[in-house]
Image: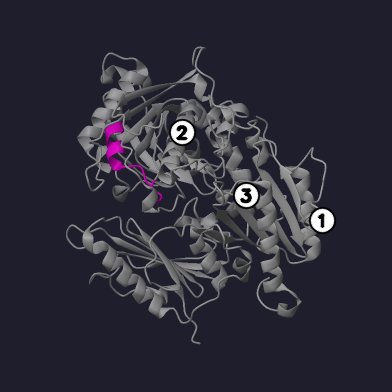
Amino acid sequence: MENRELTRRDFIRGTACAGMGITLGMAAAAPAPSSTSRTSRVVVVRNAGALDAKHNAQSDVIARMLAEGLQAFAGAATAAEAWKRFFRPDDAVAIKSTVMMTPTHPEVIRAIMEGVATAGIAGEKIRVWDRNSGGAGPAQAASATWTWHPGFDANSVSLAVGEATALVNVPGLKSHWLSGFGGALKNWCGAVTRINIFDKGVTFAFHGDSCADMGMLNALPAIRQKCRLIVVDALRPLCHGGPAVDPRYLWPYKGLLIGTDPVAVDSVGLKIIQGRRDQVRGNPWPLSPPPKHIAVAAEKYKLGTADLAQIEIVRLGWEEDAFV
Amino acid sequence: MKPWKARDLLPREVGGRSPTPPPQRFDPSNLYQYLDGGAAFYLAYDFRELAVASYPGGPGEETVVVEVYRMGNSEDAFGVYSDGAEGEHPPVGQDAGYGGGLLRFWKGCVFVRILSLSEEAGAREKILATGKEIAARVPEEGKRPRLMRALPTDGLVADRATYFHTVASLNHLYYVSDGNPLGLGPQTEAVFAEYQIGGHRPNLLLIRYPSESEAAAALQRFEAVYLAGRVSGRSESAGGKNRIEVLEDGLAVGLSREGQFLLICFEAQRATAQSLLNKAAELYRTEFGERKKGGGKP
């Protein structure tokens, strides 16, 4: 898809983003049935016990979900073997979380840190951060404990990126007022500075046309080359509004999405969010604005696969209202 | 009236507990520090300042977060409220919505959010009492936007009429196009409303421009972008003012202009589009006609 001016009519005619299943609730083309080999894999792992009745995250359940999901994603015999396929003992790992409004659960970060450590990496070399704050090791998985302020380089990119040899992208799954959807591609907004919604005097101008060019951040060589793994926190996603929380639109999906292709991961996350929206209203309730940035990331920035027909979705665990 | 700030409206205590840490204040230059990625929603209105305070809960209780947004005028306080007003409407301020531990209300030029992620039985009462305490401190009531009166009421879905200004707000409510062919901005007033009529769910977009020439130019741009490839035609039955086009999904888009007022109906049956446009134009003439000129925005 070219980064050109689209209208609602393009969606009515099914000529815009149709493969991603973005249809604005109208009769656009559905993804073609799978007949060819798929280019990207995304694991959706869920467990009904991941949150308790008060929505508190259950650390042990989440650690098991992550291990099971990563093992399936890597096709490894054990979770430890799977972690070793992504990380080496000499790696310095930086985990990009999100702390704003619908934050990544610390229990997810802790499980990732403990998993990365099984690849032989010392705790102090496994960091987590968002914007200009972070911490090191499982004891600092929660943002309330953070004392590290990495700063930014001359190109406005976090030094957490520059100092790491490997990155893990851990967004929370959410709808978003300005971009339609927030997931793996959008999470890198918190890894750069000198940005504003007016795109004035900025290093990275991506807010126009509903953040269509968001993929430019994931396309930065340091991020694109170092990001080894994506784990989306879909324990309690937000399906409307966002990032400001209206709790009526949070729901206990109790899932994690695991992948390495940010576009594929976002396409699957988008299908989940859209499924929940339609369920809430009882009729099609399309995300608005349509998250064009996912298709632009695929076609302009060549960051991955947006077409759901070309994505292998591996479902594990709890199946009720999975939406994929 | 004595000058006041958003911070003046914050309760001293909630549930017998003072705010921890001390309340914070944000203005348009640093709102993103509190609402990273979400500041744009408020900046699309005439946002002036935000005061935020977190009140710790007692044992087993969640923290209560109070956000007081002071806007430049009451119409924009209503506008922020109107985006997401569905649900229960407890008697707080000039209108309020409550659900899932979140109270939203507006009064005068203030919009307030009170959030507790608790689903305990007492949380609702505590939140509503806090809201009433804040509302009582807002010095005076405000006006709803006059443009809301141009909405036909038959078939209007409850709580689904939103007042706004910018193209980002429109595309959040209802994606129309990239770019800004309608020329929306802080200078324009707009309302987007959902209807349920005869098994269909048409939508009505009303925009009031500062001048007739701007409205005419916007209509021309919109027709060129959205109805590209279609031969322009006006409906005889509506005195030549309405343009109704049935699109590829079998539903019509209808366009009309009344001076500085632009009306667009989406996803309607042809007859419904005609009817909604004509009714809205009539209501607009009643509200903003010659006899009533001189008041309201813009």
Q: Is residue B17 left or right of residue A287?
A: left
Q: Is residue A101 magenta?
A: yes
Residue B116 coordinates in the image, percent (x, y)? 31, 59
Q: Is residue A89 something one can see in this rendering?
A: no
Chain holding disc 3: A
Q: Is residue B210 left or right of residue A174?
A: right
How far, Cα to Cα, is label 1 from label 2? Answer: 43 Å
The amino acid type of the residue labelled 1 equals Gly
Image mark for residue B240:
1
Instruction: Give the residue at the far left of this rendering.
Output: B59
Q: Check the picture and name the quadrant holding the C terminus of chain A.
A: top left
Which mark sits nearer the N-terminus, 3 or 2? 3
Image mark for residue A199:
3
Image mark for residue A271:
2
Callout 3–callout 2 Cβ contact below 8 Å: no
Residue nearest the viewer, comparing B257 with A178 = B257
